[in-house]
Image: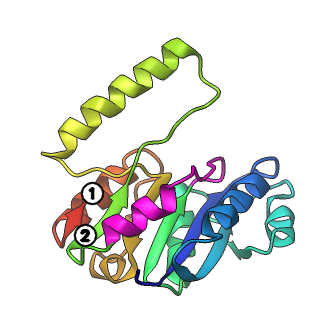
Amino acid sequence: LTMTSISFVIPAYNEEALIGDCIQSIRKALRGSRVARAEIIVVDNGSTDGTASVARRCKAKVVSQPKRGLTFARQAGHVVAKYGLVAHIDADNLMRYGWLEAVLNAMNDPEVVAVSGPLYYDDLSWATRTVVNIFYFFARLAHRILPMVQGGNFVMRNSAFAKIAGFDTSITFYGDDTDIAKRLSRIGKVR
């Protein structure tokens, strides 16, 4: 198996209660994986709580981005990422078992520039979870025509990021993941 290196970028605004669990789940996923080197970058997006302190205690690199907005935070983290693969993970996410291996397997194909998957919500009611699963079923079908990534759960090659000139910071919240998937699909495969 080929060893690889990966940077994790976590945009965070007032995530003091959740950021530690997110970082620890990444560290757990890295244990025993075929990742040679990894870094965890938390982008403090103007938090007014202890987000940055918790991230530092968890030994993550903290980057400050006072200009509020998800695309500004993702961009700030990505530009300091030093490894060839960069994972964008939301601060309230936890890595599931097998996530890292699935990503690395998909990225073994040199034509793949980005890989993404669904988010699973453990705290939803059965009915809401059913609706979410139906959404992801249709999203998988739609992905065959229109590329997509889930903003809080995707990995891209750093080289591809450079080719598309990064995130479109004029997008303040909704649609940034659709935009990035569309631009990435022009230079390679988005899985």
Name which residue lies at 32% across and 65% down. 106
**Residue holding disc 2:** 112
Q: Quadrant of the N terminus?
A: bottom left
Name which residue lies at 51% across and 75% down. 78
Magenta residues, start to end: 90-107
Identify whether 130 is placed above or below 81: above
Q: How many marks?
A: 2
Q: How far separated are the C-alphas under marks 1 and 2? A: 7 Å
Q: Earlier in the sequence, mark 1 or mark 2?
A: 2
**Residue holding disc 1:** 191
Q: Nearer the viewer, residue 4 or 86?
A: 4
Answer yes or no: is residue 133 visible: yes
Q: Quadrant of residue 68?
A: bottom right
Contact between labelled residues 2 and 1, with CB atoms less than 8 Å apart: yes
Judge whether residue 99 is colored magenta: yes
Identify whether 135 is placed above or below 99: above
